[in-house]
């Protein structure tokens, strides 16, 4: 039996459009002799639909669309479609009113409905907000093949693999007991660095433990902050790779289930990426392309400072939308170095993008003049530094509004973490392209990009990073070196380490304390940041839910027997950090 | 037995500070002869602690603090403290690693721990993200009185009251079967308009159904977007009000449990508010005061446009922080009417707040001059309108940064809903004071405020609302009249009505479609808005989780047999709406 995987890129909520995409894939799959087509989790509405699920007319429309799709599908093709189903007993048994489900469409109708059993409610996932977990093992028989169905998380929680349970049940173990021939997993699993390798390890463990072939169908495409990488694949009973779809692209792949051997046969396996940098690059390009496309923008604008962050974002945008659709704006001030102009222009020439130069000196003077009485007797400081950044932010938004461009913001994760950025200034934009990329990784990506020749001008990669908001300023006046900062941030944010643990790993206690304070104090800025493309397991954004008015960081040292005084640090009290 | 309710106002994460507040209340309660002290849900860390709960050192510190508090408490006083507890079997049974718990402290130690059973995971609540539900009925015996314990949501889901179940179990019914003498409920229940009346109805139903006296202890204070109103109270077996703490203030009240009658005796009942407006006023004042205080600001700045929104926010801020701590900045442009200045100055005089006037004409010219070549041949439009708002936003942030003020933004809910506001312009601020107050309610609050004499100048209340970003502009050029707009928004946002249902209620179909499109299209702006004080059951903010790049609104009319064409509307594609 030929089984096709439709690796689809839905638009959230676009039910007729998504349904049409499933139909087109179904026609193609049928023409290639497939008997069964798999589509990703919630393929009808796209993942994640979020609070659209609270709109009853949305849920109703999904049902209408699903019924129509069932009637439109080619004959002799069974299709598994991701949709929601009503929990009709909710008012009696208690629980949420919806299930996250898979519908089996065959013979012009909805034949069967299967409900997701393990509902992720952590990081960016809010499934318990909307859904009730299914209580039964999910399987169906097609041409005498017993096919077990799992939905995303259902397959990710084998207690043998993890050494602990995260949910009371293990749906794969239940299916194995029932003696299915094959397990399919319909997913919407967001990209993070190296996640595909991890998926393969988990599913291989499952295949080997239960001696079951496994087919994994994943969504592809960018939806706001989330990038879905696709990479759908299939493993035989021995856990060997039998087929793999392309990463970061819509795809249709077919794998054959041999009814005699009761196992999958070898099909086409797309090449894997050579490096993490290559993988991240493709993720970010897809994230920008889809955010722009799904919001109906064809052109983007960004500020080019001559620095490495805006250089990388310009390169990503050029790849995503075409160099002719990218406008770089240079906005030099009296504090800008000559190389900030020449480096930015060299970059633009390498990329072939358009540029404009709008000096901001006159505007700085006008603001100074307007504020002269109010600010009389005060020193040049953070307020004046931020103003420069905000003048630039205003000019970019004026251009975006005037010509209908999407403004891309260019701040990296290290900056966003410690608040080394200006709210309503360089943070402006519809999408924060590299907000989850630490500064050290920004450099590494640029070096990778230059592997076949210069794209990012050498001087951009070798000069000391600077905000250029006052004479002679460099980032390291305010921040620890980025290698140190990024390591502290990794431990703090990703590994949930305490100050004491980070210090024990070899970092200076005063620097660790300062970084922890800065991260806490920047919460109010991050709350107002644009969506940032997520590439790690802990990004600022929808999965980062911190209080702003909080004093935990102010008191935590009490609990770690440190000699540093009780650091009372709170949001924006100390405007010292509102720099660049 | 005397039972005291400590209606506390914790700072999120400030474990030693919150612990100290509990201790002080305990000493006071003991001196008044209390045998038992109730504190709110999660009183040790404050509610909601959000992702601080993912920091293992935070959880560890809570335990240390709790043990120390137990040792410090006065003898002969039992205290119920809200804290988290580890789910030590999580790795075996599956489930989250924490419980949302109440600790019984007595005799210098933690005597017993009770776990919350119903975990709200909707709107602003994410409890399934962190907690595992408790599986046992919670009670303890103190001096032969059997006291049943419920935590917030545990008491809100009596299926008889609602006519349906929302959870599989009903903790109060279980306690009634066990024959407790009294039910206490320890809550952190955020304020919404008229919620206290609703709480009384629910708890009265419970008291009467199970013939149990009920004591309800609620948190008070503002934490980011959430305002907790306090209003702790107690009902006897007949559902009669025996005691009620003050609204919107820290309080300690004592109620007597008569051991012979097995019922509560009448204590002190704080007066109730006369009107919804009075209640909302106190909520917003507390929200501003606590956000400023907990973020360590003592002074605020805001733009005074001469319009009703900024007038109301200035009045709230003056009440919250003292008139001497409020600075109003007037920023007239060549399009500003004379009355915008005179009305703003009259307001400032009525309030007694400081003002500054910073005309923006020169800055507008400088931006025009800087952009003259790039914008050559284009018409004055949205870009130029937004620029004025952004110049003002920059000036306000410069002042905030220079003098360490908190900037308050002044947009109302109607504007935030349809995007009639400028991102990085009038949306700038650390706190959006009236972001959950519809425009019609803004007027109503101002009239209430003027009940004893003019505070908001009459002309501000009678003139047509205008953004004054081009000559002769009024809001109603772009928007339906606010009475109509607010009714449509209420049906759409709060009642989850479809376009067809809203039209059926008597609204014009074209207006309804336009409003629905505007709401969808403004999602990208709201994502970057400051926290807004929540006063309704559906506020934009932490409980509003919508996709940005979505096309549901673009296609929804297909499903409602309407004749309007498939409206392709998406974020910011049409910059027409980015006005004011």
Image (cartoon, coloured by chain):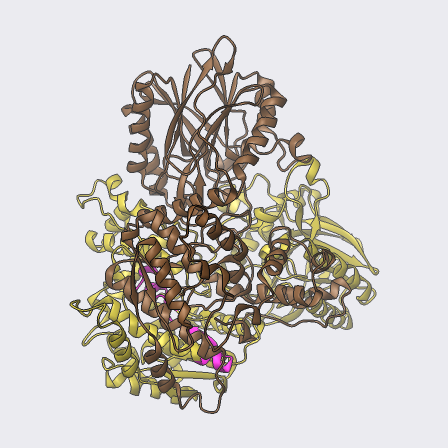
Chain colours: A brown, B yellow
Of B264 and B427, nearer the camera is B427
The image quarter in which residue A307 lies: bottom left
- Res. B498 visible in picture: no
Span highlighted in magenta in the image: B399-427
Location of the N terminus of chain A by quadrant is: top left
Q: Position of residue A432 (x, y in %)?
A: 42, 56
Is residue A151 part of the magenta span, yes or no?
A: no
Q: Residue at x 28, y 83 (%)?
A: B362
Q: Position of residue B445 (x, y in %)?
A: 38, 73
Q: Residue at x 39, y 66 (%)?
A: B437
Is residue B413 part of the magenta span, yes or no?
A: yes
Q: Position of residue B346 (x, y in %)?
A: 34, 88
Can you say whether B256 is above or below B60 in the image? below
Q: Residue furthest top?
A: A260
Can you say whether A347 is above or below A176 in the image? below
The image quarter in which residue B352 lies: bottom left
Q: Residue at x 26, y 61 (%)?
A: B577
Q: Total marks drawn? A: 0
Q: Position of residue A191 (x, y in %)?
A: 48, 42
């Amino acid at each position: 039996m030929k089984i096709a995987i439709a690796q689809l890129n839905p638009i959230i909520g676009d039910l007729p459009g998504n349904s049409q995409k499933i139909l087109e894939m179904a026609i193609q799959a049928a023409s290639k002799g497939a008997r069964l087509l798999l589509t990703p989790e919630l393929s009808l509405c796209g993942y994640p639909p979020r609070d659209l699920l609270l709109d009853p007319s949305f849920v109703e429309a999904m049902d209408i669309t699903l019924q129509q799709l069932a009637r439109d599908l080619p004959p002799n093709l069974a299709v598994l479609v991701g949709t929601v189903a009503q929990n009709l007993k909710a008012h009696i048994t208690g629980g949420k009113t919806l299930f996250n489900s898979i519908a089996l469409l065959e013979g012009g109708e909805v034949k069967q409905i299967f409900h997701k059993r393990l509902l992720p409610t952590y990081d960016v996932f809010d499934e318990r907000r909307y859904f009730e977990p299914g209580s039964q093992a999910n399987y169906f028989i097609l041409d005498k093949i017993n096919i077990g169905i799992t939905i995303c998380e259902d397959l990710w929680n084998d207690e043998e693999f993890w050494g602990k349970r995260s949910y009371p049940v293990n749906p794969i173990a239940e299916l194995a007991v029932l003696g299915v021939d094959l397990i399919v997993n319909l997913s919407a699993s967001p990209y993070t660095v190296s996640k595909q390798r991890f998926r393969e390890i988990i599913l291989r463990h499952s295949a080997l433990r239960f001696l079951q072939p496994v087919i994994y169908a994943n969504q592809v495409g960018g939806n706001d902050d989330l990038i879905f990488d696709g990479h759908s694949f299939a493993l035989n009973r021995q856990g060997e790779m039998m087929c793999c779809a392309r990463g970061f692209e819509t795809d249709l792949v077919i794998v054959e289930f041999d009814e005699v051997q009761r196992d999958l046969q070898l099909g086409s396996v797309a090449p894997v990426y050579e490096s993490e940098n290559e993988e991240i690059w493709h993720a970010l390009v897809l994230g920008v392309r889809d955010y722009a496309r799904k919001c109906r923008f064809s052109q983007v604008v960004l500020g080019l400072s001559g620095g490495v962050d805006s250089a990388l974002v310009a390169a990503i945008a050029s790849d995503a939308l075409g160099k002719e659709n990218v406008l770089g704006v240079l906005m030099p001030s009296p504090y800008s170095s000559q190389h900030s102009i020449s480096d930015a222009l060299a970059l633009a020439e390498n990329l072939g993008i358009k540029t404009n130069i709008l000096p901001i000196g006159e505007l700085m003077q006008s603001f100074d003049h307007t504020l002269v009485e109010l600010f009389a007797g005060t020193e040049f400081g953070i307020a004046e530094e931020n103003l420069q950044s905000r003048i630039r932010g205003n000019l970019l938004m004026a251009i975006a509004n005037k010509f209908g461009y999407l403004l891309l913001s260019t701040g990296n994760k290290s900056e966003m973490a410690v608040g080394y950025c200006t709210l309503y200034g360089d943070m402006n934009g519809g999408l924060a392209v590299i907000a989850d990329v630490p500064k050290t990784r920004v450099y590494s990506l640029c070096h990778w990009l230059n592997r076949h020749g210069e794209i990012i001008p050498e001087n951009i990669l070798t000069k000391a990073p600077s905000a250029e908001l006052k004479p002679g300023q460099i980032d390291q006046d305010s921040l620890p070196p980025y290698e140190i900062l990024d390591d502290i941030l990794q431990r703090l944010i990703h590994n949930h380490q305490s100050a004491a643990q980070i210090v024990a790993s070899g970092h200076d206690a005063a620097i660790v304390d300062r970084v922890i304070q800065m991260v806490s104090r920047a919460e109010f800025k991050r709350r107002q940041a644009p969506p940032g493309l997520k590439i790690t397991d802990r990004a600022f954004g929808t999965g980062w839910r911190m209080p702003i008015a909080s004093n935990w960081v102010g008191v935590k040292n009490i609990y770690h027997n440190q000699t540093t005084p009780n650091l009372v640090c709170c949001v924006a009290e100390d405007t010292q950090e509102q720099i660049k």
